[in-house]
Amino acid sequence: MKASRALAIPYVVWVLIFTVVPLGLVVWFAMTDTDGKLTLDNIFAMSEYMSVLFRSILFAIVATIICLILAFPAAYIISRANKINQSTLIVLLMVPMWINFLLRTYAWMTLLEPNGLINKLFGIFGLGPYPLINNSGAVILGMVYNYLPFMILPLYSVMVKIDQSVVEAAQDLGSNKVRLVTKILLPLSMPGISTGIIAVFVPSVSTFIISRMLGGGTNDLIGDIIEMQFSGNSYNPHLGSAMALVLMIIVMFMMSLFNQFGSEEEVIL
């Protein structure tokens, strides 16, 4: 027992330095003013940015739903491929993730801008140019592209464990594709769905690079506002910490909600 406790000391020290202390500083700055006095003014000041917060949550929800719709069939196809093809498809899925996040977003700017490749393709057929960038659609597109693998991988890890005989039995009993998905695949995949939703929603609701580069400054998210409080002329770490604390509470609530939902489904199954 003593040896196991000793082995846990480095982990405890790591958590204290890189998790507990930073969280404690966020709470301290959020609850104090520039003179170090306790106050709730920073929390109340969040009311000025509620529209931005709601926009961030809305965009994150939309991006998460789109990722789920795209990832479900993709994960199923990968899970039903043979072992060699599964490995190949997973590698192909992960290759874009090895490229720097900023570079991937710059690539989408090149594709979506008025003189970008997509509008040039439309121009060949006498169409466009279309306003594909600097709008909410471009921001959501950037979220979906960057975080889609975070939805596919959890779904794949669950679907690959679903016995093919269960699917075949449902088909033999007369289930069409709709009933097969709604009555068999969806319930059995619920733990992966809940994990994927969390993995996509959390970074989506707090992102700021995507909205800044693809939103054109007209679709700022709460992540942009928080980042502004720690840099530039609007430097205010107390307000920024308050925003981060509120966002953290929202994210923790969503995580607990989906974790509980996923656990209940797993127990039922």
Image (spheres, helix red, strand yellow):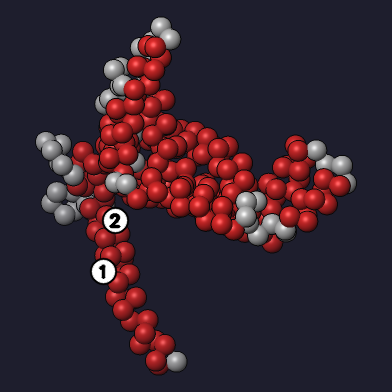
Label 2 or label 1, whichever comes before in sequence order: 1
Q: Residue 54 appears in which quarter of the rendering?
A: top left
Seen in the picture, residue 263 relative to 34 is either above or below; the reply is below
Task: Identify the disc placed on residue 17.
Answer: 1
Q: Residue 219 appears in which quarter of the rendering?
A: top left
- Residue toward you, 35 or 1: 1
Q: Which residue is drawn at 45% across and 37% down?
A: 144
Residue extending farthest front: 84
Quadrant housing the N terminus: bottom left
- Residue toward you, 213 or 21: 213
- The amino acid type, in three-letter code, at marker 2 is Val
Residue 191 position within the rendered picture, expressed as x and y whole percent measured from the top left: 61, 55
**Local secondary structure at mark 1:** helix
Left or right: where does residue 56 sit relative to residue 234?
Answer: right
Seen in the picture, residue 52 relative to 147 is either above or below; the reply is above
Q: Residue at x 58, y 37 (%)?
A: 69
Q: Which residue is drawn at 62% across and 46% down?
A: 77
Seen in the picture, residue 174 relative to 211 is either above or below; the reply is below
Q: Is residue 251 visible?
A: no
Residue 198 position within the rendered picture, expressed as x and y whole percent measured from the top left: 49, 49
- Residue toward you, 186 or 267: 186
**Local secondary structure at mark 2:** helix
The reply to whether dot 2 and dot 1 touch (C-beta < 8 Å) is no
Q: Mark 2 points at which residue?
A: 27
Left or right: where does residue 92 sit relative to residue 225?
Answer: right
- Between marks 2 and 1, how big is the CA–CA gap? 15 Å
Give the crowd class for mark 1: few <14, some 14-19, many >=20 residues within 10 Å. few
Residue 215 position within the rendered picture, expressed as x and y whole percent measured from the top left: 32, 27
Q: Which residue is drawn at 31% across and 21% down?
A: 116
